[in-house]
Image (tube, rainbow, N blue to C red):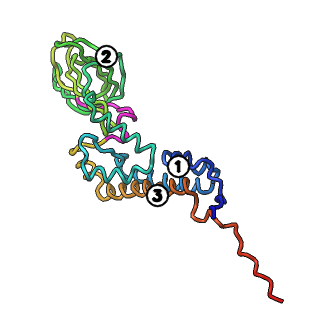
Amino acid sequence: MTTPPPKIDLRNPIVAGILAFLFPGAGHFYQRRFFKAFVFAFGIWGSWWTGMAMSDWKALQAPDRENMQTATVLKFAGQAGVGLPSLWAVYQSTRYYSKDNTSPITIAGPEEYSFQGRLNMRAENANQTGDVTGTLSLVPAKGDFGPAIGGKFAGALDGKPLTFDLANKVHLDQPIRSERKLAVTASVVDEKGEYLGELLGKIPRPLMNWFACPLDQQEEAEWHRERGKYQELAMVFVWVAGLMNLLAIWDAVEGPAYGYYDDETAPAPSPPAA
């Protein structure tokens, strides 16, 4: 006996499964199963975004392929069902652990950033120390040992405007990291290039350089300290989203469990014998 076709047109189940993996709800939308597309998208993405927000956007972490730790692999396995973010996390892990992810020696051209940090500088009459905000202008420069980064700061200290030059040895943190701010260390110099003090602070890090990046041990410990019990709860929400999407993928590929024989009616009873 041959199996009758399903009641629901699954179109191309392989395409539907891939779409469902990459973007929960997309596979069912492709199959024109709009109600299920909404249900899966709302439930899975709702759980995923809730977990990510509760975790301060740090729950999604892919393991290092050259140092596969069991705990990290198992954590990521539960998240991997939500395809696009998980694939991005794998890409970010590759970038983060790359040998190229080091503090830059120089930059390609002039750059400007909003800056928040702390200044410790000696002035003519008294030291100037305190929190500063303003604009950090960076330029490629030539240092004592080759290409370097120089610049200028323009901002305010205790409400008073100030501007000063930076020595051609500005240090920037590695570009790919889980922190949303990039650490900057610079020496303050006068017009003659003589040392006056230190400027320490942070500038914005591009979204694509921090989202879904792995955390080192110190960052992991700090994350647990800041989030407390919400950190574990956030991980559960993200895991639930990944596992729920496995069911959505199965449904997109195989169809619903009630998809066969539903339209068949019981055979009519035989007429009574004369």
Q: Position of residue 134 (x, y in %)?
A: 33, 27
The CA span between labels 3 and 2 is 49 Å
Q: Residue at x 16, y 24 (%)?
A: 126
Q: Position of residue 49 (x, y in %)?
A: 45, 50
Tell me which segment is drawn in magenta.
200-213
**In the displayed structure, would residue 108 be above or below residue 53?**
above
In terms of depth relative to the viewer, which is nearer, 157 or 13?
Answer: 13
Amino acid type, mark 2: Val
* Disc ID at residue 83: none
Dot in front, 1 or 3? 1
Amino acid type, mark 3: Met
* Image quarter of residue 257: bottom right
Q: Is residue 168 magenta?
A: no
Label 2 residue SS: strand
Q: On the picture, is 125 further left or further right than 203?
A: left
* Disc ID at residue 17: 1
